[in-house]
Image: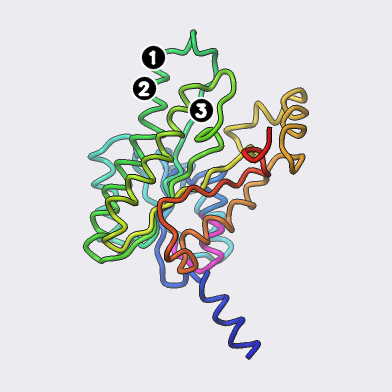
Amino acid sequence: MTTERKTMTSSLFDLTGRRALVTGSSQGIGLAIAQGLAEHGAEVVMNGRDEGKLVAAAQQLLDQGYRVSTAAFDVTEVEKVREGVDLIERRDGPIDILINNAGMQFRTPLEDFPPEKWQQLLSTNVSSVFYVGQAVARHMIARGRGKIVNIASVQSELARPGIAPYTATKGAVRNLTRGMCTDWAGHGLQINAVAPGYFKTPLNQALVDNPEFSAWLEKRTPAGRWGNVGELIGAVVFLSSEASSFVNGHTLYVDGGITASL
């Protein structure tokens, strides 16, 4: 009985035989997610714009014995996205799981925020989710199944000085996730989001290295510390697996409690 229960519990989170496309996976959160999915049995297709950097990141996982391939294309260019997704489907096989992780940040007071950076943030953080989500969903809809996990942020819910446009983009990701669910859940897809709090990543390195900011963050976060990227894996695996078969349109905050307290 104990063995049977253990096997059933494990199978809920088993991704063996599934193929996952992870955008922006050459470093930071994306790389951690790619490795986490691979550890749970998935074959992972890693994506990024810089092919050299992407291949080097993939080699790290290949060296550990995981099944990994690469697909270098710019997620902000709709035609490149469609070509890239179609190529993966032909070359590797069906994409069962999509992790929309590609993103960027730019910090400056709102009154001085360059319009070109506003456009770049929209393209990278919002348009890419729509472009890749739509391209992959068209294949998933035809098969009647699929998992899409969009990477949102605590800034989907909160704001702080100097990042208003980023906050706007991550709020859009949260609502786009709801919209994708509304349109595609009836086709057998589950579309959810993971919203990280403050994690030690290359994107946040300037803040990690700032003693004043780190002290503020540790005081502001109930858990009292920065997050480590490996702590996002459980949430992503849950939303990518059969364990979340009736979870749809949800945003799961992984933030040490920062959105729960004043």
Please state which of residues 35 and 219 is positioned toward the viewer in this rendering. 219
**Amino acid marked by disc 3:** Gln
Tags 2 and 1 touching, CB below 8 Å: yes
**Amino acid marked by disc 1:** Pro
Mark 3 lies on a secondary structure that is loop
The correct choice, above or below, for 67 with respect to 56 in the image is: below
Quadrant position of the N terminus in the picture: bottom right
Please state which of residues 58 and 180 is positioned toward the viewer in this rendering. 180
Mark 1 lies on a secondary structure that is helix
Q: Is residue 152 visible?
A: yes
Question: Neighbour class for label 3 at 10 Å: few (<14), some, many (≥20)?
Answer: some
Mark 2 lies on a secondary structure that is helix
**Would you name the residue on which mark 3 appears?**
105
Inter-mark Cα distance, 3 to 2: 12 Å
Label drawn at residue 115: 1
**Amino acid marked by disc 2:** Gln
**Residue 20 placement, left or right of 233:** left
**Residue 153 placement, left or right of 214:** left
Queried whether the magenta region covers residue 161, the answer comes back as no
Please state which of residues 104 and 244 is positioned toward the viewer in this rendering. 244
User: Which stretch did the figure color magenta?
Assistant: 34-43
Give residue 72's position: percent from left, percent from top. 37, 45
Which residue is pictured at 42% across the width and 42% down the height?
48
Inter-mark Cα distance, 3 to 1: 14 Å
**Residue 187 placement, left or right of 117:** left
Q: Is residue 22 visible?
A: no
**Would you name the residue on which mark 2 appears?**
119
